Image (cartoon, coloured by chain):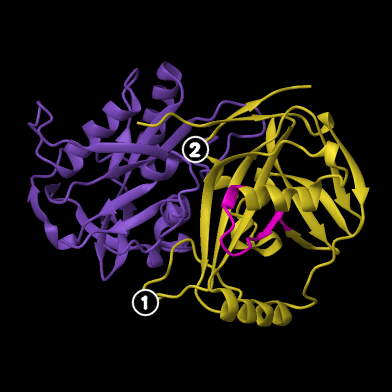
Chain colours: A yellow, B purple
């Protein structure tokens, strides 16, 4: 039997944050986004996207780093893989693009851990499921969430148009309205991990 | 054999561990045995019993098995139904000092197999823990994280994935019905099944479920 995996989490205060040039969303509306997804599907087949769960601790409770766009919409750092791209390499690429300073000697050494969740999009619609629904042989997207192990100190450069938030698990749990079905179920998917909450 | 959730291995050694072979419901045989002596107690009596156990032994730990079969090309979860509306996973409370694995095997024998199987003829392959839920008090709802108050929770429930062989005889106590419920029916159906069971599809999503055609 496999033992519980361990995640070391450090206080939010052990990390430093700066800014960098804005990274605008490629689509301005949900409809645009789905239309672009359809175009890409025709060219390249099913989209595979990878997202990172970066954990810190505050008051001995795990918190996840989320990027907030505008006033309300939150997402995990990550994005679409290029055709044929390896998942781990692709996730590192996305993490550096969203959260690392541009200079080459300030790149964090991203430690990509276990996959904790996989979501499937059966049609060009917003709804996703944690399994490929029966009778769907051609899902349009597969999204995989990975735990990323942070070291004790990191410097993050956040695009000017985004805010980086540290949200406690208890705030995410069951909060579908605010965070959507994928992010709000992360607490359950992390519940098998042993959190080693290291103070500063 | 088509693997529905086909994915690249990524060079992780996780790859094999994450593949779960499941077999058709029809390859299993189901019969019944007499019901165990029931703990017919009032809610108040049960609360007292749980409290005195807590005072004597500390946090109550329950282990439960997540067992899958295939039907209509979709994974189905085995659930026990009692009294028409109470759904439970096969499992139960650990005895003081008992390991998770030993406790789970003991409960699986009692709920799904012959009682006098002292030599553990029925081999249960317990894979990994897929989720943990904690209750800060016996009457409160379970949550998938430790209470942030820092107080010790009163109860902890751990879900373990159990892999079945290609065939098996299931022998269920007469006071339970054994059901195979499709994942798509469990998903987000907290009203019928409770948070723990309704959340199982999300806990299983990272596995590659291979529906074996026999």
Task: Tell me if residue A124 can be seen.
Answer: no
Q: Secondary structure at mark 2?
A: loop
Q: Chain of mark 1?
A: A
Q: Quadrant of residue B149?
A: top right
Task: Residue under label 1, please give it.
Answer: A135
B30 and B7: which is toward the camera: B7
- From the viewer's perspective, is residue A85 above or below residue A170? below
Q: Would you say residue A136 sits in the magenta stretch? A: no
> What number is the disc on residue A192?
2
Density class for disc 2 (Cα within 10 Å; few <14, some 14-19, many ≥20) is many
Q: How far across and how far down the image is residue A172, in percent?
A: 66, 51
Relative to B62, A93 lies left or right: right
Q: Looking at the image, which residue is at 84% across and 36% down?
A: A105
Per the image, label 1 sits on a secondary structure element best described as loop
**Left or right of B95 in this view: B188:** right
Q: Which is more toward the observer, B139 or B204?
A: B204
Number of numbered labels in the structure image:
2
* Residue B7 visible at all: yes
Q: Position of residue B164 (x, y in %)?
A: 22, 46
Q: Is residue A121 above or below residue B14?
A: below
- Name the residue located 50 percent from the left edge and 47 percent from the top edge: B10
Q: Magenta residues?
A: A75-88
In this view, the residue in front, A176 or B152, is A176
Left or right position of A28 against B48: right
> Same chain for marks 1 and 2?
yes
Real-space Cα distance between discs 1 and 2? 31 Å
Marks 1, 2: nearer the viewer: 1
Q: On what subunit does the disc labeled 2 rest?
A: A
């Amino acid at each position: 039997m496999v033992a519980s995996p361990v995640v070391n989490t450090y206080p939010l205060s052990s990390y430093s944050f700066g800014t960098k040039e804005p990274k605008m969303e490629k689509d301005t509306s949900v409809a645009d986004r789905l239309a672009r997804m359809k175009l890409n599907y025709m060219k390249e087949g099913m989209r595979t996207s990878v997202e990172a769960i970066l954990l810190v601790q505050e008051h001995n409770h795990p918190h996840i780093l989320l990027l907030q766009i505008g006033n309300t919409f939150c997402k995990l750092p990550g994005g679409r893989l290029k055709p044929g791209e390896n998942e781990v390499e692709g996730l590192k690429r996305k993490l550096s693009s969203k959260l690392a300073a541009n200079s080459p000697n300030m790149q964090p050494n991203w430690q990509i851990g276990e996959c904790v969740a996989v979501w499937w999009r059966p049609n060009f619609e917003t709804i996703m499921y944690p399994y490929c629904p029966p009778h769907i042989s051609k899902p349009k997207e597969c999204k995989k969430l990975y735990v990323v192990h942070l070291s004790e100190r990191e410097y993050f450069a956040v695009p000017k148009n985004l805010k980086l938030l540290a949200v406690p698990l208890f705030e995410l749990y069951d909060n579908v309205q605010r965070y959507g079905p994928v992010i709000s179920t992360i607490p359950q998917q992390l519940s098998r991990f042993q959190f080693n909450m290291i103070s500063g | 054999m088509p693997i529905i959730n086909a994915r690249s291995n990524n060079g992780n050694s996780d790859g094999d561990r994450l593949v779960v072979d499941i077999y058709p419901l029809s390859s299993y045989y189901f019969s019944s045995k007499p019901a165990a002596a029931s703990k017919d107690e009032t809610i108040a009596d049960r609360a007292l019993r749980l409290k005195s156990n807590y005072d004597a032994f500390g946090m109550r730990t329950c282990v439960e098995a997540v067992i899958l079969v295939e039907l209509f090309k979709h994974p189905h979860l085995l659930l026990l139904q009692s009294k028409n509306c109470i759904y439970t996973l096969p499992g139960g409370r650990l005895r003081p000092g008992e390991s998770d694995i030993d406790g789970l095997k003991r409960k699986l024998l009692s709920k799904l197999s012959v009682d006098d199987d002292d030599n553990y003829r029925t081999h249960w392959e317990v894979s990994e823990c897929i989720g943990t839920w904690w209750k800060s008090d016996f009457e409160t709802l379970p949550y998938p994280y430790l209470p942030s108050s820092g107080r010790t929770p009163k109860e902890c429930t751990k879900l373990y994935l159990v892999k079945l062989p290609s065939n098996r005889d299931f022998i269920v106590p007469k006071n339970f019905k054994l059901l195979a419920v499709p994942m798509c029916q469990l998903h987000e159906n907290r009203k019928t099944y409770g948070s723990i069971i309704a959340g199982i599809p999300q806990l299983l999503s990272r596995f590659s479920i291979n529906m074996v055609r026999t």
